[in-house]
Amino acid sequence: MSEIKKRILLLLAHPSQHRSEVNIPLFEAAKSIEGVTAVDLYGEYPRFDINIEREQQRLIDHDIVIFQFPLYWYSTPAILKEWQDLVLEYGFAYGADGVALKNKLFLCALSAGGKEDAYKSQGYNHFTIRQLLAPLEQTASLTGMRYLPPLALFGARTAIEDNRMSFYINNWQRLLKALVEDRLDLRKAAKLDKLNDQLDSIIRGE
């Protein structure tokens, strides 16, 4: 049994789960990791009636916050924006007395339909994944959280037929275990554009 040093709050936002080929398998794989609290936001709040007090307590109770979602129009699905608007209140997440999230880790685990080479200045999306997630990086900064680059699954539409899912699930579980056991080189990881191909160099003690 692994030693739990850090507790992870994983918030899944996928509005079309019956069509999900990658996010739901990744979400189910995360549930098997001790120390991970996995929350399906659309499942808990189908009418967007988010329980602010419960969500804030969840944040307080965990050391690491992960948003998991399919990239929708270069941003998050709607419920994650609603969650941020309601839960990250002044006086809780920011402002003079808003220090509840200070020093917690934050990162995104996302799927993108386009191939990896589409997410660069010369690609048809013109920006890297990290650049596209700049509003979330700034949210982490304002709330005092430590931002880590995203773990991104590119080419999500063909991941199954290309037999890439077992590779992604293995890397996803490696990352979650390393975070729980506090074995990630945070300084080195923070400088990356994405965590994808660098797990061997940033995970200690494997």
Image (tube, rainbow, N blue to C red):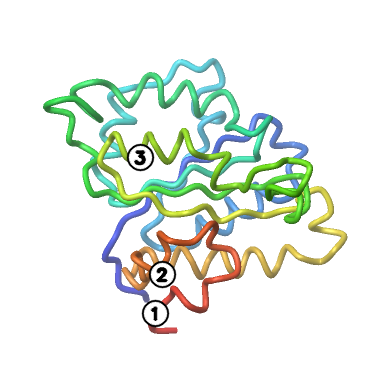
Q: Give the residue displayed 65% in from the left and 64% down from the top.
A: 168
Judged left or right of residue 6, residue 159 is right
Q: Amino acid at mark 3?
A: Ala
Q: Where is 189 relative to 70, above or below?
A: below
Q: Give the residue displayed 57% in from the left and 23% down from the top.
A: 78
What percent of the width, then of the height, locates residue 66? 44, 47
Q: Where is 148 relative to 177, above or below?
A: above
Image quadrant assignment for residue 87: top left
Q: CA distance from mark 2 to mark 1?
A: 8 Å
The residue wearing badge 2 is 178
Check disc 3: other Cα within 10 Å, few if <14, some if 14-19, many if 20+: many
The residue wearing badge 1 is 204
Q: Are marks 2 and 1 in contact (CB under 8 Å)?
A: yes
Q: Amino acid at mark 1?
A: Arg
Q: Quadrant of the C terminus?
A: bottom left
Judged left or right of residue 104, residue 2 is right
Q: Amino acid at mark 2?
A: Ala
What percent of the width, then of the height, locates residue 97? 12, 27
Q: Give the residue displayed 23% in from the left and 28% down from the top.
A: 94
The residue wearing badge 3 is 140
